[in-house]
Amino acid sequence: MSRTMLTTRTTLTPSLIAIVGFLTVCPVVMLVFGSFSEGLGAFGTFTLEKYIRSYTDPALASIIVNTVIFIIGSALVATVLALFLAYLNTRTNIPFKFLFRIISIIPMMIPHILFSVSWVLLLNPSNGILNLLLREILSLEGAPFNIYTLPGMILVEGLLDLPIAYLILAPAMSSFDVSLEESSKVCGSSDLRTLGRITLPVLRPAILSSVILVIVRSLASFAVPSIIGMPGRIYVLSTHIYRIIATGFAADFGMAAAVGMSVLATSISLIYLYRYLTSESEKYVTISSRGYRPTVINLKNAKYPLFGIVALISSVLIVLPVLVLFYTSLIPYSMVPSAKAFAMMSWKNWMEVLRDPISLLSLKNSVFLGIGGATLGVILSIFVAYTIVKIRTPAAGALESLSFLSFSFPGIVVGVGFMWFFVRTPLYATIWSLLIGYIATYLPYGIRPMTSAFVQIHSHLEESSRVCGGGTLYTLRRIVIPLLIPGIVSGWILMATMFVRELTLSVVLSRPGTEVLAVQILRFAEDGLWGQLSALGIMMIFISTTLVVIASVIGAKLTKIETVIS
Amino acid sequence: MEIQIKSLSKDFFSEGKRIKALANVDLTIPANQIFTLLGPSGCGKTTLLRCIVGLETPDSGEIAIGEEIVWSEEKNIFVPPEKRGLSMVFQTYAIWPHMNVFDNVAYPLQTRKEPKEDIKRKVERTLRFVQMEGFENRPATKLSGGQQQRVALARALVAEPKVILFDEPLSNLDAKLREETRKELRSFLTELKITAVYVTHDRIEALSLSDTVAVMRDGRIVEIGTPKKIYFDSDHRFVADFIGRANLIDGKVKAVEDSYTIIDSGIGTIACQKCPDLSPGNAVTLCIRPEFIKLMEGDTGDGRNIFWGRVESLIFVGEAYEGEISITDTRLITRIEPTANVKEGDEIALSFDPDHCFVLSK
């Protein structure tokens, strides 16, 4: 019995390595081939021409400068804001702490492209609602703000990456040994001095990892550069690649691959630096095993003003985008909310979207990709996580590194790599090419929650069931699966919401007939159809939210059934 | 039910090295006794337990529980753990966090598909036995360490198993609770008249709980005996040293008398327990425990087994002083009454109780 288990186990690992290896290595290998080839249709002979052409482009220098400013700026904005919020939440007596949980989770549900659009609607120089409002109030000549600038891009990207930075910093801050701070205070330092001299230096690895992770994400970001950057003619590497393959007369996938190579290399090195730092920070930040609560700093009079700032940030992150989109979807053209605007409101934009065959197709495709892709992705993640956590052979370690590698892949670059692959298969221009690409790019997000779910199941829990008389299947049904359900549900939710709103990979792989929601929204933005865009955007948010609710309800039901049976 | 283990071996591979977890273990665990496997960590005691219960497959040998062979390399028999009819209390208790107390305890009966009313009655009875009645609906995550331990015990007892196995079940409790639980466990097990195999590295646990103790080292059983035999009269130097504080003195047999054996050693001539199979000239090691070295005050008696030494250090540990005495080049630890009138640097006379000086033959 244990021998048969052993053989299934030994065949499981290589086949998983084959699948995950294909998903992660294939786009990279094809990217390399592509960058040295003559054309997308046929590889032709080995040539350096694409590299020479793309790296001697005189525009490239300014694009790289823009990119560096953009990614570092966003990383600083996100990390500073996250530090501020995490400190207030974990270490002070600020009221309404539940708001912080919302800040850290909800923005993940608002698609980046819609968030960027809502800022364009608020702050574009010609008819941004906030600009119009300020012009009226202060009777100004021109618009006071212009979102189509590098600072505008940095602000929006920084806010978008705030949740990621917060999720890294908050646990680090709440788990570090307070006695380090207490001894500083005993030595006579004030709260503020302790913060500067002890708290922040001890947290340095966590802060650095947050900065690096946000840099990686903003390097891969396409929503902000395309919606905010391109109208202002500010190009970064991701939009530069997009311009090479999607605009102009001849799409050149070879040049796109050549540029993509350096983006990919940067991203992979940063992710390995991040990984090194997180393993370091585990050594650095000491977590004490006794259940202590960190001392809470009394904010006294600063309590409510500080809370005001938090409330402002959360409303800017969550309420404002949805509100602006909904408002825009109801009015015929951009205007300041007024009696006139409310009188002109109608469902016209909504009706137009629902009559538009391409919008309807994109709705159908995205729902299919969300449900089907997340289901397949979670099933694959369960096996991979099981291998990583429970089998632990050197091969399983290789699997972990592989699946972690794709975490660093910028969607648009992976898309270019996959394009070189799919064009040679019957999958080209089908929905299946998108499905495979999505799973390849977002697999780590499914594996993460599954790994922690498996880690939670101590081997004694299974063994104890066996000794109590439960066979393998009985143990699986009554012990292992029920304990895994929370992990399965959260992995599925994470993947489904990401797939419904996927943009960066889709702009490359989506062809006529395989349009998806985010790509359709980008088309609307390029055509300036803000009303229809907003209507479709609200539908997209509604679909994501519905999937989350359904998955949570099913998850809760399954856990309940277990207690009823027994 | 008796457990018979015949030449059981198992190797582990760790970092390219082969480690002998079990090396040809032959062992009979008598029925209806509390049998303890004691040894330092890595000695193979937990591996042996896991082989008995079926969670680990040995490389060779045979295991029989009662009349039934549950593992045999030769006869190609492997009965999976769920068919062995045993029960086990794990070091981590392995209480399932997604179930309440009732379901955790009822689980072994549910796997056997017993009628609902029987399950309810048996679970109630068992919970009362471990003094956890009224906790049926408590979620498993809302239990203290001591309560988890009781639930784990209830789950192990509820199906009236042939044998119950314990894998260091007290090591996760704090010192005071551990002591209380040890006493309770002793009374539960004595009341039940059940075969229990208990694995621990704690010598006090082993001595106070067991009917029989088997001391293990490097995958082998070194010595088996009652707690008293193991403590007062062990045959092996390793066992004597592991089971309690011991003064070990090397020497040579001088004479074998009617009631005592006389040993020549570095500190002088010592009379000790009679060992008929020794003859003059044999090299031996003597063991004497600190509590059998007495401080002589005033009268030094007939002079047998009396030695003069210097108090090197004296540490007050509550119920007594722990003294370190040097006699010529040999240092001995002794237990000195807290009322004794001695201080560091004093020359004192010590007497060894010859009935508690024993020769380690191996």
Image (spheres, coloured by chain):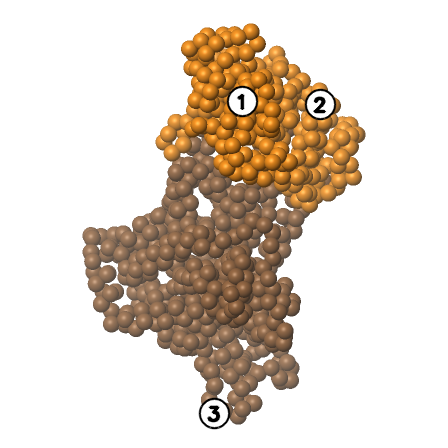
Chain colours: A brown, B orange
Query: Mark 1 or mark 2: which comes first in sequence?
Result: 2
Residue under numbered circle 2: B190
Give the chain of mark 1.
Answer: B
What numbered label is drawn on residue A141? 3
Where's residue A543, x and y in %? 58, 59
Residue flagged by tag 3: what amino acid is it? Glu
Q: Quadrant of the C terminus of chain A?
A: top right
Which of the two marks, 1 or 2, is nearer to us in this view?
A: 1
Element under label 1? strand
What numbered label is drawn on residue B306? 1
Residue flagged by tag 2: what amino acid is it? Thr
Q: Left or right of A91: which side holds A196? A: left
Question: Could you tell me how far apart the alpha carbons at marks 1 and 2 are, in whole angstroms?
Answer: 43 Å
What numbered label is drawn on residue B20? none
Element under label 2? helix
Give the chain of mark 2.
Answer: B
CB within 8 Å, label 2 to label 3: no
Who is closer to the viewer here, A282 or A405? A282
